[in-house]
Image (tube, rainbow, N blue to C red):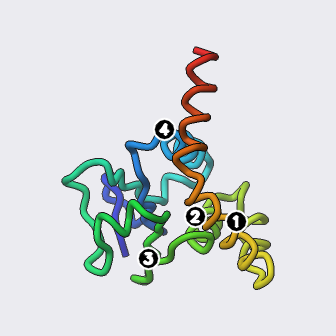
Amino acid sequence: MTHTSKGQAAGATVFYDGACPLCRAEIGLYRDARGADALEFVDLSDSAAALPENLSRAEALARFHVGVGDGRLVSGAAAFAELWSHLPRWRGVARMARWPVIRTMLELVYRVFLKLRPVIVWLFVRTIGRRA
């Protein structure tokens, strides 16, 4: 099982790209959610961030990953479902995201998102910049 910086047992370890403004904003929502204190958040933009043995930094930055307390590492749509399952307000979404048809659809959408991510991040930054 992983541990948080507070020394508590963590239900899961969330690996995210802290250099990505969109990723930071989304992780911020999860960090503020009830139940997030049982999660460990690892910012991959920090070169000193520890990674599991079976995950390279390049792989970690290419897809969203969550390490589960039992040692498994999940990525993509499955990683989101795992993260959501630890947050009480998101548990219903997590259950639906694990249904085979929904899981497949979410993974396909996630793969399309990854291809469009640079453009989406650019639009996100541009939109946020206008509001500031």
**For the point 29% across and 71% down, which residue is it?**
56
Q: Residue at x 56, y 70 (%)?
A: 76
The amino acid at mark 4 is: Pro
Q: Which one is closest to the eye, mark 3 or mark 1?
A: 1
| Numbered mark located on residue 26 in the image | none
The image quarter in which residue 70 lies: bottom left
Q: Which mark is residue 109?
A: 1
Distance CA(mark 4)–CA(mark 3): 27 Å
Q: CB of mark 3 within 8 Å of CB of mark 2?
A: no
Rendering coords of residue 64 (x, y %) = 49, 63
In the rendered image, which residue does mark 4 sit on? 21
Q: Measure how far apart labels 4 and 2 are at the Cα level.
A: 19 Å
- Which residue appears at 44% of the width and 43% of the height? 20
Name the mark on residue 83: 2
Label 3 vs 2, first from the N-terminus: 3
- The image quarter in which residue 107 lies: bottom right
Front residue of 76 and 14: 76
Choose the circle earlier in sequence order: 4 or 2.
4
Q: Quadrant of the N terminus?
A: bottom left
Image quadrant where one finds the C terminus: top right
Q: Can residue 31 be seen here?
A: no
Q: Is residue 50 left or right of residue 120?
A: left
Among the two numbered marks 1 and 4 on one chain, the one whose residue lies closer to the N terminus: 4
For the residue carrying disc 4, how many other residues have a C-alpha within 10 Å: few (<14), some (14-19), or many (20+)? some
- The residue mark sitting in front, 4 or 3, is 4
Cα distance between the residues tagged 1 and 4: 20 Å
Of marks 4 and 2, the one in the foreground: 4
**Type of amino acid under label 1:** Val
Gap between marks 2 and 1, in whole Å? Answer: 18 Å
The residue singled out by tag 3 in the image is 69
User: x, y (%) of residue 54?
Assistant: 30, 81
Which label's residue is closer to the chain start, 3 or 1? 3
